[in-house]
Amino acid sequence: MGTVVQLKNRVDDTYSDLKSFLEDKLILVEEKIKSRLSSKVQLVDEMTKYHLETGGKRLRALLTLGSSKLCGYAKGNRDVNLAACVELIHAATLMHDDVIDNSNLRRGKKTLNDIWGNQSSILVGDYLLSRCFEMMVEDGDQEVLKLLSSTSAEISQGEVLQLQHKGEIDMLEETYLKIISSKTASLFAAATKVGAILSNKESKIKDALEFYGKNLGLTFQIADDALDYNSELKLFGKEIGNDFYEGKITLPIILLYQKASTDEKKNVKEYFAKQNRSENNFKDILKLIKKYSIINHCYAKAEYFINLSSNSLSIFPECKEKQILKKLTTFSLDRNF
C-alpha cells in the first residue's frame, strides 16, 4: 500500500488534465497577478518580476477555478480574482519561509532572500499580502474576506508552531499534523471552499469542498515530505534532502525515530542537534529510512487522507470537473512542486 510506483502509475497526468481544462481562466489569473504586482518602486518591481519568472504550478489557483466550475459559477471573473488572491497568499508565505529556513534555492533557482537579502524579501512578501487584501476588499464578499484573512492568520500560526518545535526529534505525529494542517492544508481548504461561496451554495456543499481541500493539502504535504527522503527521486530529476540539511523535523524522521533502536535514535538525535549536517549524515539517515520502510509508512498515512478527500466529493453529481478533482486526490509523486 502506497509504494512510489503504484501511486505514480495510478495518477497519470491529472495535473495536466486540470490545467488544460482551465487554461483560459489560468491565463487570466496570471495576467491579474502581473498587473497587481506592478510597482513604481524599482526594487519591488524587480523582485516581483523575478518571482513570477521562477514559475510555479499554480495548483491552488487551479483548485479555486476548478471548485468554482464544479459549483456552476459562470458569471464574471470573481473566480479569477480570488484565484489570484490565493496564489498571492501562497507566494508571500514562500518568501517568508525562505527567510526563516535560510533557503537559497527554490524550484532550482536562487531565492529572493539569497539575491536581495532577508529584509527586502520579508517586505516584498508583505507587499504581496497587502495587494491580496486589496483585491479581497474589492470583491466585497464578507464571507470570502473572513475566510481568506483567517486562513492567512492560520498559516502564520502554523509557521510559529513549527518554529516552536524546531529540532524536536521526538515530535508527536499529532503536532506534525497540526503544523501542516495550518501551513499547507488551510490554504488548500480555503481555495476549494471559495468556489462554493462564489456560487452561493448551501453550507453542506461549502463544507464538503473545504473538507476536500484540507485533506488534499494534508496528502500533498505528507507526500512531499516523504519524497525528500526517497533516493529513487533521482530518477525523476528532483533534489532530495533539503529538509534534512535545513534541520526540519517532518513525518519520515518522526516515524524513523519511533522505530529506530536505542543506538540509532542517539545518532539521529545527534544529527539534528548539529548546526550543519553533512552528506554522510544524510546517507546514514537514508539507510535507516530504507531499513524501516519509512517511505511506505508515510504513503500509507497519506492514503488515509486521500480517501477522506475523495469521498467528500460524493455529494456532487458525476461530471468532468468532479472526475478531475477526484483523480487529483491520488497525488502524483512524480512532480517538481
Image (spheres, helix red, strand yellow):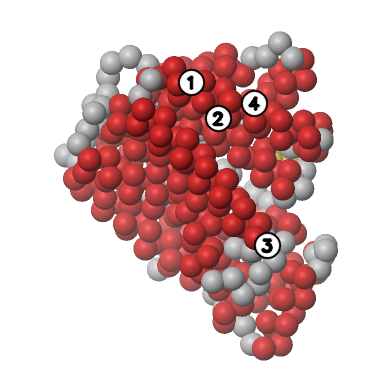
Q: Residue at 70% of width from left, 43% of height from top? A: 98
Instruction: Give the labeled residue for mark 3.
Output: 166
Q: Mark 1 points at which residue?
A: 135
Earlier in the chain: of badge 2 and badge 3, it is 2
Q: Which of marks 3 and 1 is nearer the N terminus?
A: 1
Q: In which quarter of the image is residue 14?
A: top left
Disc 1 marks a residue whose amino acid type is Met
Q: Which residue position is annotated with label 4?
A: 127
**Whole-Å distance between the Cαs marked 3 and 1?**
34 Å
**In the image, what residue type sits under mark 4?**
Tyr
Q: Is mark 2 on a helix, strand or loop?
A: helix
| Measured Cα–Cα span from mark 4 to mark 3 | 27 Å
User: Which numbered mark, 1 or 2, is in the foreground of this view?
Assistant: 1
Q: Residue most toward the bottom?
A: 262
Whether label 4 touches label 1, CB < 8 Å: no
Which mark is on residue 88? 2
Classify residue 7 as left or right of residue 259.
Answer: left
Front of the two marks 2 and 4: 4
| Front one among 9 and 139 | 139
Give the mark nearer the N terminus: 4 vs 3. 4
The answer to whether residue 23 is seen in the rendering is: no
